[in-house]
């Protein structure tokens, strides 16, 4: 007797690759919130973006947690592959951005969300370190995704500073800044020695994110010279990415294009915040251009990734663990 085919349930193979573009959308909404200060624009538009993306993030997170509830080991399996490591990091770091979204609305809830994000991030780092130590040697190679795992704590101050944790955020700034510099240096040596394969080249865009966030946090803590330095370094990284755009996209569209989204949103936020702080028209224009570019690019990438998930092929394409 022939066995009936196994029924595919919702959530059985949720790909972590959906989260980088959601992460980028949350960053875009926060960048538009910065634009309300830089351009005296109405707040309704960023609130609309942030409200819609928050619902999308909650839905996607629920789907992935459903997958975990059916077989917890899928987390470890997803961490063995680059799209999984990047996606799970983006999912956890999105909780920090959600806390930043909530700060003006309800500081008490924002504080709880921040705490949840910090706990989840620490657990993720422990799992990543375990995977790196116990996995094959080639898995221990430094990649831009390391910024998300080990420098990603720099996102927490976006909400922690307004909530009154300035002293702790100073420590986070210096520690993550040192880690980011180390990853930049090692990555530069690796790129000189060996050309990354075309499918993995979009991940190089992640190098822009730490510069943007370190600059933003420096500015929020009152370190304007440091913020200007990070903004300048970010401009060099962005210029290099733009000059090599064809090189970065040589393999064609893939879910890894989500790596283009959140760094661009973060850099636009930095420029807009810096423009308001130093009253620079040039920075205001540059921030507006970056924000416009992000508004045109980030949703397109997110829609294509979500369409691939909805059609059911994204999990297999990214080798996502299955229940």
Image: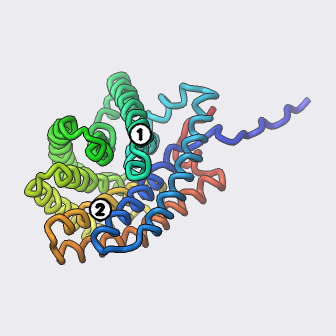
- The N terminus - image quarter: top right
Q: Report x, y in % for residue 37.
A: 30, 68
Which residue in the protein does label 1 denote?
A: 108
How many labels, in total? 2
Q: Report x, y in % for residue 219.
A: 17, 54
Q: Report x, y in % for residue 11.
A: 64, 40
Tell me how far mark 1 sits from mark 2, CA to CA: 24 Å
Q: Nearer the viewer, residue 113 or 257?
A: 113
- Sequence order check, earlier mark of 1 and 2: 1
> Residue at the left extreme?
225
The part of the image, by quadrant, that contains residue 153 is: top left
Q: Which mark is residue 9?
A: none
Which residue in the protein does label 2 denote?
A: 269
Residue 135 vertical position relative to residue 145 in the rendered view, above or below? above
Name the residue located 50 percent from the left edge and 64 percent from the top edge: 48
Circle 1 or circle 2, nearest the eye = 1
Does residue 78 appear in the picture of this structure?
Answer: yes
Name the residue located 15 percent from the left edge and 59 percent from the top edge: 233
Say what secondary structure mark 2 lies in.
helix
Name the residue located 80 percent from the left edge and 37 percent from the top edge: 5
């Amino acid at each position: 007797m022939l066995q009936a085919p196994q029924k595919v349930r919702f959530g059985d193979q949720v790909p972590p690759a959906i989260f980088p573009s959601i992460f980028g959308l949350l960053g875009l909404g926060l960048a538009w919130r910065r634009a309300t200060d830089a351009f005296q624009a109405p707040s309704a538009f960023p609130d609309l973006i942030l409200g819609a993306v928050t619902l999308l993030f909650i839905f996607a997170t629920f789907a992935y947690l459903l997958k975990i509830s059916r077989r917890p080991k899928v987390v470890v399996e997803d961490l063995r592959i680059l799209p999984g490591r990047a996606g799970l990091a983006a999912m956890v770091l999105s909780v920090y951005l959600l806390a930043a979204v909530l700060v003006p609305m309800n500081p008490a809830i924002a504080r709880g969300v921040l705490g949840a994000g910090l706990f989840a991030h620490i657990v993720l780092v422990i799992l990543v370190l375990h995977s790196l130590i116990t996995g094959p040697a080639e898995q221990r190679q430094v990649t831009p995704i390391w910024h998300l795992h080990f420098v990603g704590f720099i996102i927490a101050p976006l909400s922690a500073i307004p909530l009154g944790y300035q002293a702790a955020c100073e420590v986070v700034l210096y520690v993550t800044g040192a880690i980011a510099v180390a990853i930049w240096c090692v990555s530069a040596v690796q790129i000189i020695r060996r050309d990354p394969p075309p499918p993995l080249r979009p991940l190089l865009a992640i190098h822009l994110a730490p510069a943007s966030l370190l600059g933003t946090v420096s500015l929020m803590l009152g370190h304007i010279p440091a913020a200007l330095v990070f903004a300048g370094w970010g401009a060099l990284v962005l210029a290099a990415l733009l000059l090599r755009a064809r090189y970065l996209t040589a393999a064609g569209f893939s879910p890894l294009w989500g790596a283009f989204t959140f760094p661009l949103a973060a850099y636009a936020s930095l420029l807009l915040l810096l423009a308001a702080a130093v009253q620079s028209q040039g920075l205001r224009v540059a921030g507006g251009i970056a924000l416009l570019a992000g508004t045109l690019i980030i949703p397109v990438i997110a829609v294509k990734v979500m369409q691939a998930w909805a059609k059911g092929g994204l999990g297999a394409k990214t080798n996502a663990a299955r229940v």
